[in-house]
Image (spheres, rainbow, N blue to C red):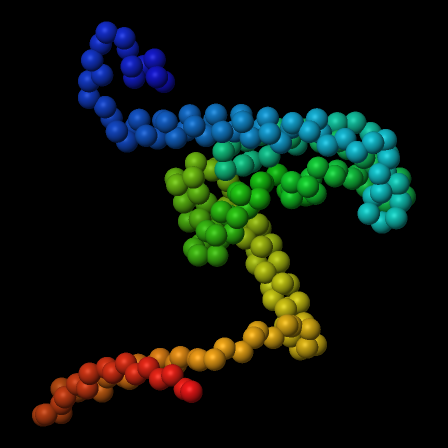
Amino acid sequence: MFARLFVPGQPLGRVDMEATEWSLRQAMHQVGGLVLEKVVNADGGDYCGVRLTCGAGHEARFVDYRQKHLLTVLGEVAVQRAYYYCASCQRGVVPKDRALDIVGTSFSPGVRRLMGHVGAKEPFEAGREDLEKLAGIKLKTKAVERVAEAIGEQIEEISRRERAQALADKVVPLKSVPKFYISYDGTGVPVTTDAPHARVRRSRRVTRAPT
């Protein structure tokens, strides 16, 4: 790209600003994706020994290293992970997936946050289009829907736990403050065309500080 833009001994000429900035952003995303892939794989796959606890009280044995392709805000990266298998539970255990918060998903936490943001504000198809236009992230509409709904369920579960704690008197009360300020606005009087001398009352703001 720089070879095309800056040719030695030749004037730069007219620059297509929009095309150049989009091209530079795409190039920086590619570079960032390469750096991110190096960072997440710097641990060699997060090998934890021949055996580890599966989480249900059993032992899982190391099998091999397995790769997962993960869509991130910088593009797709390949994540190398140590794979363990628990014969008692008959399921695989991947410690690195838990550490990176990518268990059961091929979307990074950053991408899932963006999917939840657009999914909460607009139709899923419109959200998918916005993610592609604004962030360069190409997704299917159904993926945006599933992730946004899953995040909504997680938020609702957190709210349920907080309500349960409040009802069980497990919430630590806040310390009292010496002064508490209250501010309120008055409302305007409606004006109708059939009132010959209709007047509008100005809104008043009153602030009181109880002792």
Q: Is residue 105 visible?
A: yes
In this view, the residue in front, 175 or 21, is 175
Q: Residue at x 53, y 43 (%)?
A: 110
Q: Residue at x 42, y 25 (%)?
A: 27
Q: Is residue 48 left or right of residue 186?
A: right
Q: Is residue 68 left or right of residue 13?
A: right
Identify the image quadrant of the N terminus: top left
Q: How many marks?
A: 0
- What is the x, y in percent for residue 54? 83, 43
- Measured along the vertical axis of the image, is residue 140 above or below residue 204? above
Q: In which quadrant of the rendered view does residue 49 lie?
A: top right
- What is the x, y in percent for residue 17? 26, 29
Q: Is residue 66 visible?
A: no
- What is the x, y in percent for residue 65? 75, 27
Q: In which quadrant of the rendered view does residue 59 lie?
A: top right
In this view, the residue in front, 140 or 98, is 98
In this view, the residue in front, 75 or 202, is 202
